[in-house]
């Protein structure tokens, strides 16, 4: 808000000297400012009381058609069972995320969709959420790792997980058979495999134009080399980025760099996934929905993956990166008993089954959910995450949002551009980290 | 306008306003002034104030003195590139795109064949928003699927037009310039049409050649257009945002001050204090141009 009105101000000032356009500009500026403030005011009015009694309000970020429909089925099932109404207001996924601060401080819906991990704990710490430990006690079928991801820094539970999707090394089954490639179990094999792929003219797919896809690889190398606890501490700002442990991550990553396809910084994840489908590249570190959404229906069964290889025997393949999506209860909900009742339902295997029947690119969090209808890929994903000793979210979900977006995205892009200057890079990150985490 | 106001008529003139005049004037002046203060100067002053604080948009606002500015100058790798890119943007528009637009206007004004066709073709991109231009740039310049690489047919080692930070800014500038040229051309074309042909005839009679006629006679009479074009060029350069944001969120060689402000203030990041500090830097840069411009205008007014 401050930026846009300021921007209008700057533009206005440049032109005020010209008497002809002054009034027109003022008018434009007024309309512009109105356009900026009005929707939020309207939204604030619109979100007035309406809850209470038998209706629960729910803020949704599921704006894509497939998830939107899937969630609607879940809420329909709840309404049918409880005879209560769920009033869903869906906002564009990115807008919802960008406006989350203002949304939570205004008059948010009773229940809203969000992510697990630090990204939830951040708001819990700011007292913008309601603790749901009382109902969490009754939840069944969630692993300790999931419970940890639903817990705030104060040890209380805030989050109801619904589904997640693992990150791993994805490839085409048929292409691996055709070329005789074998999944790599450790780092040396992995590098050897990558080298062979590059030699064959089908390198490892890589993309980071969007800024976030490379984070998956960083997280995995870090967790395989230094362990999950270090990942958590590093993301929480407690460990120094200049330590030899972090430099080790970048050094290992540097070994892989020559075998990537060129031009990663100009490639979107969609293009990278399409390249994988067209057999221009041989494998990629991806999250499950990435190839899932870009492969045509007929070739989806050809998608396969193997877990990210072991680097240090101490940490093996313990951690799995598997971002979790689910629900939170806002502070001072208008209908707290109703909202909690809804959340209890959302924590059941039934809710997850209804959801996944309509959106099969993810897997259910609850162990009780029926997996009979899962595809081979989904079943394999379940094995991967249920065998995990720890579950990490993703770099941008495990740390402060400002650190992830304004520091880590440019830093990783700098590394991809110039993998040689690791010292300069980690010094830059550390300096910015200190100033951002000092803001607490 | 009298050059000097004499003391006596001043009071008389005051009396000439009836109460109704005063009310009308008060409303007509007061409302714009209030709006101006509320939506221009208010936020500006607020930004300056916030730039000395640390605030995440939720909790308390804490004063941190000049730390934001210190971090900006020493610990924010994107800051100096952004300043450089903004200045480069300005230089490119001012010294390449704008003169080129003027050249096209002169050529079309002389009446080449199909001038209407050229005119509309060149003006077409102006109606597109820069965000759309950004999408077009991606369709043309994408490394794997772009039209340009398909035409060049260099499959072994295609150029990464938008991903290579050494060239992507120039590519974006070409697209931004593509739009700017048409804009400048149409403004100058209108200006040239209004130049009195007798001036050119007089110059020709005095023995001036075409070049002299243009630079010594026609161009100076275009002064009002020059002013508008100058202002537009500066505004376009400082507010550049949408095209790079569409292409890669203004990262990796496409950093701009406007993007850094957005990244820090809007969105989940909410480093409102830090972002405000960048906004103040942009304001200072803008003020530099505004002051120069105003000084020149006021001087020009006196000279006329």
Image (cartoon, coloured by chain):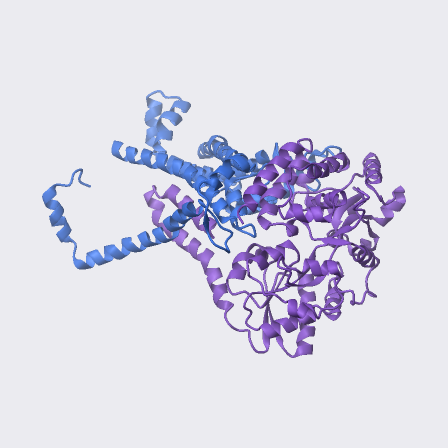
Chain letter matching colour purple: A
- Name above or below for residue A165 compared with residue B68: below
Camera-side residue: B158 or B119? B158
Tell me residue A274's x, y (percent): 75, 47
Camera-side residue: A64 or A430? A430
Camera-side residue: A92 or A127? A127
| Residue B142 is at least partly visible in this image | no
Furthest-front residue in this view: A154
Tell me residue B154's x, y (percent): 73, 33
Chain letter matching colour blue: B
Tell me residue B39's x, y (percent): 39, 52
Tell me residue B179's x, y (percent): 52, 40
- Name above or below for residue A415 compared with residue A95: above
Q: Residue at the location (78% across, 56% down)?
A: A385
Label total for image: 0
Quadrant hosting residue B204: top left
Q: Is residue B265 left or right of residue B42?
A: right
- Name above or below for residue A147 compared with residue A86: above
Q: Is residue B160 left or right of residue B82?
A: right
| Residue A114 is at least partly visible in this image | yes
Quadrant hosting residue B5: top left
Camera-side residue: B99 or B191? B99
Q: Residue at the location (71% across, 71% down)?
A: A138
Q: Residue at the location (32% across, 21% down)?
A: B206
Furthest-left residue in this view: B8
Q: Is residue A221 left or right of residue B42?
A: right
Furthest-bottom residue in this view: A83
């Amino acid at each position: 808000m401050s930026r846009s009105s300021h921007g209008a101000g700057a533009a206005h000032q440049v032109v005020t000297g010209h008497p002809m356009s002054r009034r027109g500009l003022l008018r434009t500026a007024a309309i512009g400012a109105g356009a900026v403030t009005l929707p939020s005011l309207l939204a604030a009015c619109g979100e007035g009381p309406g809850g209470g009694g038998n209706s629960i309000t729910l803020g949704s970020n599921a704006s894509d058609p497939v998830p939107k429909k899937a969630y609607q089925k879940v809420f329909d099932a709840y309404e049918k069972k409880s005879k209560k109404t769920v009033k869903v207001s869906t906002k564009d996924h990115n807008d919802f995320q960008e406006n989350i601060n203002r949304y939570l401080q205004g008059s948010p819906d009773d229940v809203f969709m969000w992510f697990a991990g630090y990204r939830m704990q951040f708001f819990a710490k700011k007292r913008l959420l309601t603790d749901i430990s009382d109902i969490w006690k009754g939840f069944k079928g969630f692993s300790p790792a999931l419970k940890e991801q639903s817990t705030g820094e104060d040890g209380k539970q805030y989050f109801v997980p619904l589904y997640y999707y693992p990150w791993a090394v994805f490839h085409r089954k048929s292409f691996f058979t055709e070329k005789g490639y074998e999944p790599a179990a450790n780092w040396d094999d992995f590098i050897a495999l990558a080298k062979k792929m590059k030699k064959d003219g089908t390198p490892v797919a890589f993309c980071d134009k969007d800024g976030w896809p490379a984070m998956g690889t960083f997280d995995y190398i870090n967790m395989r080399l230094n362990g999950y606890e270090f990942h958590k501490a590093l993301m929480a700002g407690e460990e120094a980025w200049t330590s030899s442990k972090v430099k080790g991550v970048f050094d290992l990553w540097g070994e892989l760099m020559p075998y990537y396809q060129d031009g990663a910084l100009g490639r979107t994840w969609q293009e990278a996934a399409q390249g994988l489908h067209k057999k221009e590249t041989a494998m990629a570190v991806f999250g499950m929905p990435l190839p899932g959404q870009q492969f045509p229906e007929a070739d989806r069964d050809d998608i396969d993956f193997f877990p990210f290889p072991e680097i240090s025997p101490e940490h093996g393949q313990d951690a799995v990166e598997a971002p979790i999506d689910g629900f939170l209860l806002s502070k001072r909900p208008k209908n707290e008993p109703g909202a909690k009742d809804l959340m209890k339902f959302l924590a059941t295997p039934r809710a997850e089954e209804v959801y996944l029947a309509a959106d099969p690119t993810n897997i259910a969090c609850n162990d009780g959910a029926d997996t009979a209808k899962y595809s081979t890929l989904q079943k394999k994903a379940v094995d991967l995450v249920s065998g995990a000793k720890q579950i990490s979210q993703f770099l941008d979900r495990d740390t402060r949002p400002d650190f992830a977006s304004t520091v880590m995205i440019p830093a990783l892009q700098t590394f991809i551009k110039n993998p040689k200057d690791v010292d300069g890079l980690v010094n830059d990150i550390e300096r910015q980290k200190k100033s951002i985490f000092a803001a607490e | 306008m009298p050059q000097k106001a004499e003391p006596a008529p001043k009071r008389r003139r005051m009396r000439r306003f009836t109460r109704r005049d005063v009310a009308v004037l008060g409303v007509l002046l007061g409302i714009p002034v209030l709006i101006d203060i509320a939506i221009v100067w208010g936020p500006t002053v607020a930004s300056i104030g916030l730039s000395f604080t640390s605030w995440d948009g939720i909790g308390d606002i804490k004063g941190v003195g000049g730390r934001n500015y210190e971090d900006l100058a020493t610990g924010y790798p994107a800051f100096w590139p952004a300043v450089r890119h903004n200045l480069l943007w300005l230089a490119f528009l001012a010294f390449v795109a704008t003169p080129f637009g003027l050249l096209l206007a002169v050529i079309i004004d002389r009446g080449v064949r199909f001038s209407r066709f050229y005119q509309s073709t060149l003006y077409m991109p102006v109606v597109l928003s820069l965000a759309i231009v950004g999408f077009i740039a991606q369709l043309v310049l994408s490394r794997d699927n772009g039209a340009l690489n398909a035409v060049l047919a260099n499959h072994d080692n295609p150029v990464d037009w938008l991903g290579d930070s050494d060239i992507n800014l120039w590519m974006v500038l070409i697209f931004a310039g593509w739009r700017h040229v048409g804009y400048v051309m149409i403004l100058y074309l209108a200006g040239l049409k209004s130049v009195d042909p007798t001036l050119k005839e007089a110059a020709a009679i005095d023995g001036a050649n075409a070049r002299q006629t243009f630079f010594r006679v026609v161009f100076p009479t275009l002064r009002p257009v020059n002013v508008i074009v100058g202002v537009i060029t500066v505004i376009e350069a400082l507010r550049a945002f949408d095209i790079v944001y569409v292409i890669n969120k203004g990262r990796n060689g496409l950093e701009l001050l406007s993007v850094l402000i957005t990244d820090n203030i809007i969105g989940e990041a909410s480093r409102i204090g830090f972002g405000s500090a960048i906004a103040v830097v942009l304001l200072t840069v803008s003020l530099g141009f505004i002051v120069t411009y105003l000084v020149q205008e006021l001087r020009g007014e006196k000279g006329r």
